[in-house]
Image: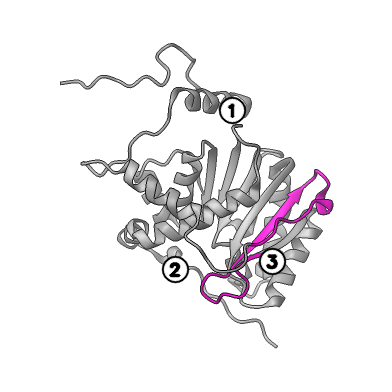
């Protein structure tokens, strides 16, 4: 049986107008928020501790806004310049990189405390040219090998994706394991055509494959916590001018600056009594 042919994701061909329409669509925002909250749950990071995360296929920063809200520092990579332009216009907090993930990453070893990816991994199964190095196995190998190096030990990476066959799942998981990852597949609502979601949950170190995989959600799909949090965030951030409110308090800002210093980032402002203080309006 031949592998189904995949085409590049629509966002690669988006112009600025289409990218903005995609980003401002509330249905897209809702879906992205739900899956990002679930990915963070599977990532299982220590509570109330700062972490530096990689958002793979960050697009216009919809997942990044959730990472901001949850108090994480993050960097995002995406192949679509128009989506990154929208992310810049929306003034997302993360550092943004234009990157074909099938070419691998160039980050320093151990840079990130974890990684998430929403609706992206399946596109690595697309062979862009007939050259052997563009084949899905080669692209997946470069991707997982360099990602493994970029993550600290121990850590996790969680991918929500849309496989079209069991063969695709087997190919992806086997190459990830050859790159040094432990872990496997978690399926939420496996008996529901509408609600079924597939996650690849990978581990670096910390016991590797000996770690127990999280359980997938089962039963009827319910109005879960992620949707409730998304609606509360939309109501909280909406202002008369349409701008997002600044949700960061002093403690969050201090944690973020300290994490930047540990990562060796230059030009981090010094802490002072004015850190996190709201500026008075100038008339």
Classify mark 2: helix, strand or loop: helix
**Dot 2 or dot 3, earlier in sequence:** 2
State which mark lies toward you, 1 or 3.
Answer: 1
- Alpha carbon of mark 1 to alpha carbon of mark 2: how far? 35 Å
**Residue 199 is covered by the magenta coloring:** yes
Vertical comparison of 171 with 254: above or below: below
**Dot 1 or dot 2, earlier in sequence:** 2
- Alpha carbon of mark 2 to alpha carbon of mark 3: how far? 23 Å
Q: Are marks 1 and 2 in contact (CB under 8 Å)?
A: no
Q: Position of residue 55 (x, y in %)?
A: 55, 49
- Would residue 61 appear left or right of 220 to someone viewing this image? left
Residue located at (51% from left, 22% from top): 254
- Would residue 2 appear left or right of 275 to someone viewing this image? right
Extreme residue toward the left, this view: 283
Q: Assess disc 1: are there few (<14), some (14-19) or many (≥20) residues with their C-alpha within 10 Å of its C-alpha.
A: some
Q: Which residue is mark 2?
A: 10
Q: Position of residue 189 (x, y in %)?
A: 60, 68
Classify mark 1: helix, strand or loop: helix
Residue 259's label in the rendered image is 1
Question: Number of callouts in the render?
Answer: 3
Quarter residue 191 falls in:
bottom right
* Of 66 and 212, the residue lying toward us: 212
Q: Assess disc 2: are there few (<14), some (14-19) or many (≥20) residues with their C-alpha within 10 Å of its C-alpha.
A: few
- Alpha carbon of mark 1 to alpha carbon of mark 3: how far? 37 Å
Vertical comparison of 222 with 248: above or below: below
Residue 133's label in the rendered image is 3
Residue located at (74% from left, 71% from top): 170
Q: Position of residue 168 (x, y in %)?
A: 68, 73
């Amino acid at each position: 049986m031949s592998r189904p042919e995949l085409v590049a994701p629509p966002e690669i061909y988006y112009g600025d107008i289409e990218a903005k329409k995609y980003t401002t669509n509330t249905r897209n925002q809702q879906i992205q928020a739900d899956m990002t909250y679930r990915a963070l749950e599977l990532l299982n990071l220590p509570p109330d501790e700062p972490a530096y995360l990689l958002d793979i296929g960050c697009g216009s920063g919809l997942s990044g806004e959730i990472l901001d809200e949850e108090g994480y520092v993050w960097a995002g990579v995406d192949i679509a310049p128009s989506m990154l332009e929208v992310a810049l216009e929306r003034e997302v907090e993360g550092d943004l990189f234009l990157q074909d993930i099938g070419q691998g990453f160039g980050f320093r070893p151990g840079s990130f405390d974890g990684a998430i990816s929403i609706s992206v991994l399946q596109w690595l199964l697309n062979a862009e040219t007939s050259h052997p190095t563009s084949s899905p196995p080669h692209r997946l190998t470069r991707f997982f090998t360099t990602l493994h190096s970029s993550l600290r030990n121990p850590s996790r990476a969680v991918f929500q994706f849309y496989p079209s066959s069991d063969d695709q799942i087997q190919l992806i998981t086997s190459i990830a394991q050859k790159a040094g990852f432990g872990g496997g597949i978690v399926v939420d609502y496996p008996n529901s055509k509408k609600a079924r979601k597939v996650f690849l949950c990978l581990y670096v170190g910390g016991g590797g494959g000996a770690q127990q995989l999280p359980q997938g959600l089962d039963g009827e799909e319910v109005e879960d916590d992620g949707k409730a949090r998304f609606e509360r965030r939309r109501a909280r951030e909406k202002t008369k001018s349409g701008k997002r409110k600044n949700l960061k308090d002093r403690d969050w800002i201090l944690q973020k600056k300290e994490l930047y210093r540990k990562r060796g980032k230059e030009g981090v402002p010094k802490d002072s009594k004015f850190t996190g203080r709201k500026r008075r309006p100038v008339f």
